Image (spheres, rainbow, N blue to C red):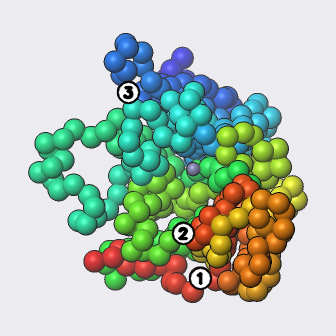
């Protein structure tokens, strides 16, 4: 029986994809587990794995979600998309991990309770001499649970993934958008490869269909260990087109962001040649398209303490000088000179940073503002 399946697979060149206990079968959805860690209580912490494989050969597309345990909409999107209907016209293989952080999912916390560092900085990547431990220190201290487990998971990504989309959420009142990392390279001889990788990744951003915001420039990217995020490592270490998608609300499933995620995931598979048809427009959430590239910035800041009232929503385009919010005192009366908080730059509103209480000097919004930094860069020296 096994031999027959192997010959059949060989004839039509469908490769077998294995992640943990899940092993792909043409024309089927299979489920399994990737072992994360043994817990002191004798339980095993494990990551759920879904593999959907078409009957026609094609690329392998990874979707990962919920590495931050309180970011839930991506998991719902995986649940909605990786259903039997997906198999009907699928070429190639979809690997979907609905929760990379089951401990955080159970406790509704960003970071698993047995970790101190962000699990989305645990993937292998370029060693930063300023912040990363030396080889001697590494030998003395065993890796944390996530550093060890994500290194093993990354081997599965390296082996099988042609594309990767990592699904996140952003805040209490936040837009849905795609984060586009910069492509870094070591040697000048690798520049052409890096340019081509950027071109493919940029196409994937466009195909997904949300607004695009650039990740930090090279120095800050490495200092913040963003190259060791799920998509950062897939892009800059495994050299495959990989993006981070932010889906609005943290702590609950946002129906409009969920609809956008479903459209974007199917668009990604169409772009990769794995599903027939053209990409669909995302209409459930705003898709800002300013005439310039953008990066994230926390601005403007409040000049006084007070009760905050926003005049913008996530996804709104704004111009420098537009009123973003107003401040009143506790009686609802404007605070004399400092009641209006205005945009410091042209751009669009990613998220509203506060509820009602605002202290002098605090950031009011996270904005997408003009970014002229290069998108293909040397790893910083
Ligand atoms: Zn996140």
Where is residue 360 shown, x and y percent of the image?
Answer: 61, 69
Residue 75: name its quadrant: top right
The CA span between labels 2 and 1 is 10 Å
Read off the residue under disc 3: 37
47 w.r.t. 15: above or below: above
Residue at x 80% of width, y 82% of height: 322
Of mark 3 and mark 1, the one earlier in the sequence is 3
The secondary element bearing badge 1 is classed as loop
User: How busy is the neighbourhood of tag 3: few (under 14 within 10 Å), some, or many (20 plus)?
Assistant: some
User: How busy is the neighbourhood of tag 2: few (under 14 within 10 Å), some, or many (20 plus)?
Assistant: many
Q: Assess mark 3: CB under 8 A from ligand 1?
A: no
Of mark 2 and mark 1, the one earlier in the sequence is 2
Residue 163: name its quadrant: bottom right
Residue at x 78% of width, y 45% of height: 254
Farthest right residue? 283
Of mark 2 and mark 3, the one earlier in the sequence is 3
Instruction: Tell which tag, 3 or 1, sits nearer the viewer.
Output: 1
User: How busy is the neighbourhood of tag 1: few (under 14 within 10 Å), some, or many (20 plus)?
Assistant: some
Read off the residue under disc 1: 371
Where is residue 97 shown, x and y percent of the image?
Answer: 57, 37
The secondary element bearing badge 3 is classed as strand
How many numbered marks have been drawn onto this rendered protein structure? 3
Residue at x 15% of width, y 49% of height: 137
The secondary element bearing badge 2 is classed as loop
- Determine whether, in the image, residue 162 is placed left or right of residue 274: left
Where is residue 41 shown, x and y percent of the image?
Answer: 38, 14
Q: Give whichever of 291, 355 is nearer the camera.
A: 355
Read off the residue under disc 2: 215
């Amino acid at each position: 029986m096994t031999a027959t399946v192997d010959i059949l697979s060989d004839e039509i060149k469908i490769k077998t994809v294995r992640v943990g206990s899940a092993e792909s079968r043409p024309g089927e959805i299979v489920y399994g587990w990737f072992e994360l860690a043994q817990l002191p209580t004798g339980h095993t912490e494990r990551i759920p794995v879904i593999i959907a494989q078409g009957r026609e050969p094609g690329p392998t597309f990874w979707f990962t979600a919920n590495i931050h345990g309180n970011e839930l909409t991506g998991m719902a999107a995986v649940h909605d998309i990786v259903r039997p209907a997906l198999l009907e016209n699928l070429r190639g293989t979809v690997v979907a991990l609905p929760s990379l952080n089951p401990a955080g999912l159970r406790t509704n916390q960003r970071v698993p309770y047995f970790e101190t560092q962000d699990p989305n900085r645990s993937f292998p990547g370029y060693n930063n001499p300023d912040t990363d431990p030396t080889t001697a220190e590494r030998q003395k201290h065993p890796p944390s649970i996530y550093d060890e487990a994500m290194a093993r998971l990354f081997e599965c990504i390296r082996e099988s993934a042609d594309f990767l989309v990592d699904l996140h959420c952003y805040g209490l009142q936040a837009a849905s958008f795609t984060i586009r990392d910069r492509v870094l390279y070591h040697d000048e001889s690798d520049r052409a490869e890096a340019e081509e990788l950027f071109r493919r990744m940029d196409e994937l951003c466009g195909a997904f269909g949300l607004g695009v915001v650039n990740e930090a420039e090279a120095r800050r990217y490495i200092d913040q260990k963003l190259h060791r995020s799920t998509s950062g490592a897939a892009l800059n270490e495994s050299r495959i087109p990989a993006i981070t998608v932010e889906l609005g609300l943290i702590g609950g499933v946002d129906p409009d962001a969920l609809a956008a995620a479903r459209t974007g995931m199917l668009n990604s598979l169409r772009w990769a040649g794995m599903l027939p048809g053209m990409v669909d427009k995302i209409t459930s959430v705003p898709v800002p398209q300013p005439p310039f590239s953008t990066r994230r910035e926390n601005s403007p800041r409040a000049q006084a303490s007070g009760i905050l009232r926003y005049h913008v929503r996530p996804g709104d385009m704004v111009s420098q000088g537009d009123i973003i919010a107003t401040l009143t005192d506790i009686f609802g009366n404007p605070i004399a000179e400092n009641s209006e908080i205005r945009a410091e730059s042209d751009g669009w509103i990613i998220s509203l940073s506060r509820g009602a209480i605002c202290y002098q000097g605090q950031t009011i919004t996270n904005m997408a503002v003009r970014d002229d930094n290069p998108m293909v860069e040397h790893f910083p020296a």
